[in-house]
Image (cartoon, rainbow, N blue to C red):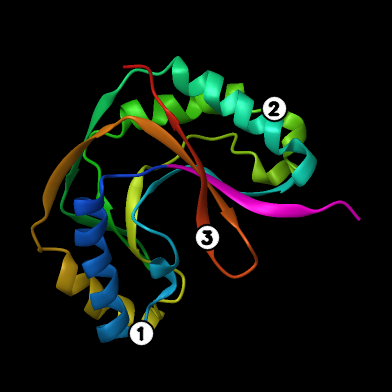
Amino acid sequence: MPAKHLHLITLMPPETMRTAIRSFKKEMNSRFVAKHALKLPAHITLQRPFWMLEEHGESVERSLEEFAQKQMLFPVHLKGFDCFRPRVIYVRIPNPEPIVQLQLRLQQALPSEIFLKEQERQHNPIHPHMTVATRDLKQKDFHRAWKTFQCREYEAGFTADRLVLFRHDGKLWSIKKQFLFKD
């Protein structure tokens, strides 16, 4: 049976922002035993996790390199928190349109044969955000957690300058490769 691995394509903020958002995730874990979001550094998902055969790796990396070289740098602004009831709390991106457009262009650039399951390919626009708590936040804790974060102030920004390809090894996510945008 051919080797396959779970992959994810993202935008990732600089280390200082990842550290700040990690502190929110750690707070969620310590106060509400919600640790799933800690499995990945702060990021904005462009392509949900998908299974890919090892043999498609070079082709995908080539496609991502070519795609990234055609993208211009753009600012990403984060402000406050929002939620997807009843389990997800995230840092809000008030102007998601540049990221939505990037994701739509990315979908056209990714070779369709890399997706082992058709439902893994995103056909609809994403809702860009940076997750603080997700599926392991219990519904009974959601309201208390949301009350804690809904009025909390957080504002930051960064320049989106690369795509990040993550690979899951069966236990952990790690960065497989980064693809810089055109200067």
**Which residue is rendered at x = 23% and y = 68% of the image?**
24
Front in this rendered view, residue 90 or 73:
73
Instruction: Report the amino acid beneath label 1.
Output: Val
Say above or below: 97 vs 155. above
Q: Position of residue 79 (x, y in %)?
A: 15, 47
Specify the segment rendered in magenta. 1-10
Query: Is residue 86 visible to us here?
Result: no
Residue tagged by mark 3?
173
Q: Position of residue 11 (x, y in %)?
A: 39, 40
Is residue 9 rendered magenta in the image? yes
Pointer 1: residues within 10 angstroms few (<14), some, or many (20+)? Answer: some
Which sits earlier in the primary sequence, circle 1 or circle 3? Answer: 1
Say above or below: 114 vs 51. above
Instruction: Report the amino acid beneath label 3.
Output: Trp
Decide whether the magenta segment is chiefly helix, strand or loop.
Answer: strand
Query: Is residue 34 visible to us here?
Result: yes
- The numbered mark at residue 111 is 2
Q: CA distance from mark 2 to mark 3?
A: 22 Å
On the rendered structure, is 165 left or right of 155?
A: right
Contact flag, marks 2 and 3 (Cβ < 8 Å): no
- The numbered mark at residue 33 is 1
Q: Quadrant of the C terminus?
A: top left
Which sits earlier in the primary sequence, circle 2 or circle 3? Answer: 2
Front in this rendered view, residue 168 or 134:
168
